[in-house]
Image: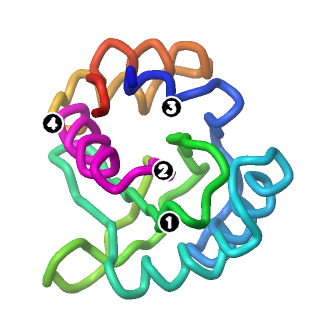
Amino acid sequence: MAGTELFDENLVFLEPEISCKADLFKWFAAYMEEAGYVKESYYDNITLREKEYPTGLQTSTVGVAIPHTDPENLKKPFIAVIRPKSGIPFEPMGIAEGAIEAELIFMLGVLKDGQQVTALQNLMGLLCNTEAVSALMSVEEKKEIINIIKANFGPIE
């Protein structure tokens, strides 16, 4: 599958006024369930998974989070891009302490476990490209965000 097929302008959210993970997950789960992407179990599962396996990541340019859940909570695959009005605190990946102010959030929903690893690798490659990340943070149009991602995101197998 071309990794870029997972991205859609309708799943790019610019400057929603959300200040905490709980509100983010509740809002996103409701939107995605209504849009037919996730099952009712999505909200509880993503909340639990984020608590057990935090996804905050401080890159050289911006705080990022990549919340994801188990495939059985999904109806169809997606990667949503959220650039909130202000940073949302996320616990960091691994054993680091403190909080990451996530200013760029990728909500990952892939249907096969192997694809999840590849999607994460592609996202990490994108996040290592400081020029692309700076562009993602500054452009104002959803279509521009999709174009930047398409230029920097590989296939998912």
**Magenta-span inclusion, residue 3:** no
The image position of residue 65, as x and y in percent, is 38, 59
Residue type indicated by callout 1: Ile
Q: Earlier in the sequence, mark 2 or mark 4?
A: 2
Q: Residue at x 85, y 52 (%)?
A: 34
Q: Which residue is mark 3?
A: 6
Label 1: few (<14), some or many (≥20) within 10 Å? many
Asked if the residues shown at circle 2 and circle 4 are in contact, with their CB atoms under 8 angstroms apart, the answer is no
Nearer the observer, disc 4 or disc 3?
3
N-terminal of the pair, mark 4 or mark 3, is 3
Mark 1 or mark 3: which is in front?
3
Measure the alpha-carbon separation of dots 3 and 2.
11 Å
Secondary-structure class at tag 1: strand
Magenta stretch encompasses residue 106: yes
Q: CA distance from mark 4 to mark 1?
A: 21 Å
Q: Tell me what residue is drawn at x 15 percent, y 46 percent.
A: 60
Residue holding disc 1: 88
Q: Which mark is residue 111?
A: 2
How many numbered circles are shown? 4
Q: Quadrant of the N terminus?
A: top left
User: Which is closer to the viewer, label 4 or label 1?
Assistant: 4
Nearer the observer: mark 1 or 2; the answer is 2
Considering the numbered disc 3 on the image, is that residue within a helix, a strand or a loop?
helix
The mark that comes first in sequence, 1 or 2, is 1
Which residue is denoted by mark 4 in the rendering?
128
| Placement of 126 over or under 146, stated as above or below | below
Mark 4 element type = helix
Q: Position of residue 40 (x, y in %)?
A: 76, 70
What segment carries the magenta color?
Answer: 105-126
Mark 2 against mark 4, which lies toward the viewer? 2
Measure how far apart labels 1 and 3 are at the Cα level: 24 Å
Hey, which residue is sitting farthest right in the picture? 34
